[in-house]
Amino acid sequence: MLTETPNATSRVEVLDRLRSLCLEHGLERLAVDLGELIGIVQDDLVQLEIELDELRGGERLSERAAAHLLTQGGKRLRPLCVLLAARVGSGSSRPAIDLAVAAELVHNATLLHDDVVDLATERRGHVAARAEYGNAASIFAGDWLLIEALQRVRRAAVPGTLDLLLQVIAEMIRAESLQLECRGRLDTRRDVYLDIAEGKSATLFGWALRAGAAAGGLGPAGCAALGDFGRHLGLAFQIVDDLLDLTGDPAVTGKALFTDLREGKMTYPLLVALERDVDLRAHVERVLDYARLGQEPSLDLCRIVQRRLHESGAVAESQTLAAAEIGRARACLAALPASEATRALELVAEATLHRRH
Amino acid sequence: MLTETPNATSRVEVLDRLRSLCLEHGLERLAVDLGELIGIVQDDLVQLEIELDELRGGERLSERAAAHLLTQGGKRLRPLCVLLAARVGSGSSRPAIDLAVAAELVHNATLLHDDVVDLATERRGHVAARAEYGNAASIFAGDWLLIEALQRVRRAAVPGTLDLLLQVIAEMIRAESLQLECRGRLDTRRDVYLDIAEGKSATLFGWALRAGAAAGGLGPAGCAALGDFGRHLGLAFQIVDDLLDLTGDPAVTGKALFTDLREGKMTYPLLVALERDVDLRAHVERVLDYARLGQEPSLDLCRIVQRRLHESGAVAESQTLAAAEIGRARACLAALPASEATRALELVAEATLHRRH
């Protein structure tokens, strides 16, 4: 039933892809530097993939649904953050790898539940686990990955990380629930959007960085600085995600245009554009009407919405906010002694801003 | 939106109900003894209800869905087990109450997810949370209660209890997934049924007793004995649950007859009867056919299935197995010094066998 047999070592391609992206963007310097970055955490990332692969092979429907999602790649950005944060301190360790795996598992657990909530049919360019194995299996799969994550954090025994992760997951659930309540509500306020984005995305990035820092033996100030870096990075990541939903290239993102919008999820550029362009609302309502009927919006309608997003300045304003968050993230690094690892984190932040998938 | 405002103190009625049940069954001695039992844990049970009530009042849809279920009563049997096990040792304590609340929360978390999986419309004689607040809210509500439970176990800081609970939840998920795979499969083997019943029911009872014992300061032998007591009690509880689904009085159980069967859940009496009565299969298939069409089976059909369950000896055999499990549970108590608390646990075991809801 499993559709892919990934070669663990090939997954360092995650970093290769980041590098190609920089080259496409004319960021040659960044690309060269990312090459060095690969060297820092290559072994850890290989180990990460080996341990994720070990979760495959279970017979239960829940295990197969989870494996279905886990083996379809993903950017592995959260575990990369854990591993780099650990290297700001004393470097690689068994606990750091456990925490990195846990970060990826929590992320995947939320995707499995979200796809049921959103009745999603695709994920990462493949059929969604819930569409292949059913909603029930996808729910249990999410539950299972959550427990697997917590067991690893428990085993890592890095002070503070388990309690913080429990708080973070509670916050993620609260934010997902708030997002559900705002579904299709074009009058959602920006501060409510930011509450959702921080809860569903920024907190787990914050945990990844802080937990990695703690595994690397950093003190409270270092952990706090990296945790803050993570939250800013996570918020920027989410806003870029929003932009990709509305203006990205589906062939690159692996996700149909307006997927979030059609699920009624309010995104930052959309809310800004709706504030600025009173005529946009009717067009967006039409997209939602199509979605309610299970139909795709016409290409013309998509283009109208996209044009208005650009012309209202909402795209530019969203890019500015994402860039500002990346700036704040980088400023957090200033509290730490410069090292190869802090430089790598800066590059990750920069690449996040320019990512196209 | 909340339909009930329970008075925390009134919930000691859980024990009162157990007592009435004994009286109805002509078990006067048991009823009198249960009266004493109420005295032992009354204050703890009141505190339990206060703490469950504190989870109400959240604004989020997930919180309201969880509160909807939590405020509709339930037997509170798992927390009662935690509290009594603690009293086998040094008695009531802050950690024991945290663990008792956690046991109830994990149970409710699984119900919230199960109801989505089963597309259930009713629970505990009321509209199911997923029917009132939607599947999405019910999924997030289950996630939330799970995290709330784990936070309490973490705070209780009783050695071994968190790791064991994580294992137990993983086992519950595996069993639920296996149950899903056996849905509607009338050829499910008894050993597979027992694997499911132990995973989904016995393990959490086992944890409740063992965790309570550890909170009460018992040593490894005492914890193991009470953990074993719990697993046998839990398996008996499940088999009685199965019997109630097929032969219970809906006015007392608060659950329509054949609810499990119509969801395709294989129960012990049914599997035994199918083995013994080759003509039963066609009737059961008809019940499942009705269920697929969203229709109730006719009263006649129900009576035919019930009669064959009795006449094949499957009901008696299931009662015998439940009684044997209760016997094994009671035997586990022999390893412990006799006390008011061990006597209370014996009574809970006896009442579980005779319960009618």
Image (cartoon, coloured by chain):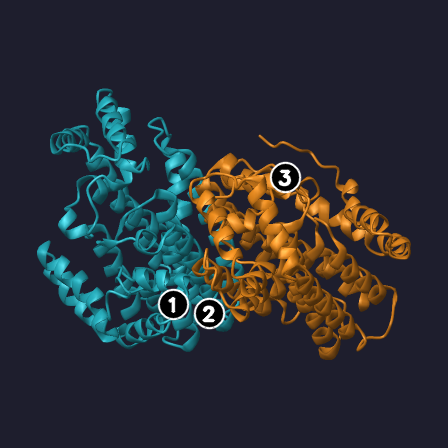
Chain colours: A cyan, B orange
- Residue farthest front in this picture: B279
Residue behind mark 1: A101
Whether pointer 1 and pointer 2 mark residues with C-beta atoms closer than 8 Å, the reply is yes
Quick check: B46 above or below A296?
Answer: below
A188 vs B310, left or right, is left
Residue at 77% over, 50% down: B45
Viewer-proximal residue among A324 and B44: B44
Parent chain of label 3: B
The N terminus of chain B sits in image quarter: top right
A263 vs B6, left or right, is left
Query: Mark 2 or mark 3, which is nearer to you?
Result: 3
Viewer-proximal residue among A329 and B341: B341
Q: CA distance from mark 1 to mark 2?
A: 8 Å
Q: Secondary structure at mark 3?
A: loop
- Residue farthest top in this picture: A278
Q: Residues within 10 Å of mark 1 (few under 14, many from 20)?
A: many
Quick check: B135 above or below B162?
Answer: above
A316 vs B81, left or right, is left
Amino acid, disc 1: Val
Parent chain of label 1: A
A49 vs A249, left or right, is right
Viewer can see residue A348: yes
Residue at 27% over, 36% down: A262
Tag of residue B125 = 3
Viewer-proximal residue among B163 and B75: B75
Residue behind mark 2: A152
